[in-house]
Image (spheres, rainbow, N blue to C red):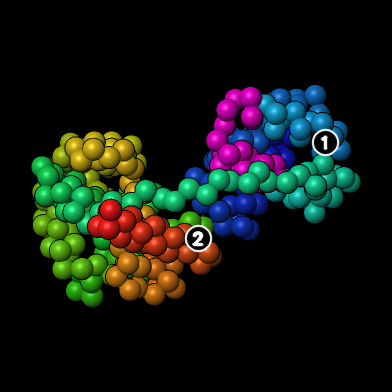
Amino acid sequence: MFQLLSQYLEYLEIEKGLSINTIEAYRRDLEVFLEQNSDCENFDNFKRNHINNYIMFLHDKKYAPSSIMRKIAALKGFFKWACSNELCTVNPTITLEQPKLPKHLPKVLTLNEIETILKSNLSLEEHLIVELLYSCGLRVSELVNLTVGNINLSSKYIICKGKGDKERMIPIGEIAKKVITKYLEERKMLIDKFGLNTNRLLIKENGNFVTRQDIYKLIHKKGMEIGKNISPHTLRHSFATHLLENGADLRIVQELLGHSDVSTTQLYTHVSKKRLKDVYFSINK
């Protein structure tokens, strides 16, 4: 079964074009399921009770609804692939329904809060991180994988790879351009100092690459300074919401965020409406 799992993950990477992070998440999820049912030697050994027991296990472990949704999606995809390749005759997940997620509006910072963070005690590298997360709406994974070649300062845009390795072009403003220009000078000194041979954009003062964990720690720390528990994705949410509040077209924001479905982007219109109501009622108490 684990050999078949490897074949399925290879299919997800080559034919479906899923990102490495998604594939690794699916691998972990499906390995847990297979380990729990190690007595099943082929797909036809799996019955609906195996699936139900797995879902009960997830609930007992207090997994968040979003995590359970992903794990069920991984399971359904695995069995669907098996049936399409004639590895099983009956799909035990065929009538399995996804749990409904409670609708939570994303957390968003105000312009003043963004400015406070940008004017705080930041190194040049940290300033660039905050600037690109907010003014370009990048995901953390997209930011850490940026290369110098992804940046075109003369035409004022960057190219990043999003989910499914889909590339998109994002314009950069004058402030971001100035910060990038200054940082590239500092980066050159680090390259020379440590004798590095890399095209990766973000390099720490000790010569190591900036990691996702480094960025999470930085943004969490800066959030605590303004009394907010935030993550890098909060800056992406803020980027989208502020664009819509200032009249940007929904489809344009969708393109900038790299959303495959506009319904995902529409969530930010609800955030804008809620913020408008909050401001109105705070003025008219």
Task: Say if residue 252 shows up in the picture.
Answer: yes
* Number of numbered tags placed on the structure image: 2
Q: Which residue is mark 1?
A: 48
- Tell me the element at label 1: helix
Q: Which residues are magenta?
A: 58-76
Residue at left 63%, top 58%?
15
Q: Nearer the viewer, residue 250 or 161?
A: 250
In the rendered image, residue 50, in percent from the top left (x then y), is placed at 79, 31
**Horizontal placement of 205 versus 263: left or right?**
left
Q: Residue at x 72, y 40 (%)?
A: 4
Reply above or below: 156 against 218: below
Which residue has dot 2 on it? Answer: 264
Q: Residue furthest front?
A: 285
Tag 2 or tag 1, which sits nearer the N-term? 1
Residue lying farthest to the right in this orientation: 89
Q: Quadrant of the N terminus?
A: top right
Identify the secondary structure beneath mark 2. helix
Is 46 placed above or below 147 here? above
Amino acid type of disc 1? Arg
Q: Position of residue 77 (x, y in %)?
A: 70, 48
Question: 175 and 9: which one is in front?
Answer: 175
Mark 1 and mark 2: span between their CA atoms? 32 Å
Which residue is at a point 80% across and 48% down the rendered structure image? 94
Most common SS among magenta residues: helix
- Residue 272 placement (x, y as % from top left): 37, 61
The amino acid type found where label 2 is placed reads Thr
Q: Is residue 161 visible?
A: no
Residue 219 placement: quadrant: top left
Residue 74 falls inside the magenta stretch: yes
Q: Position of residue 17 (x, y in %)?
A: 57, 57
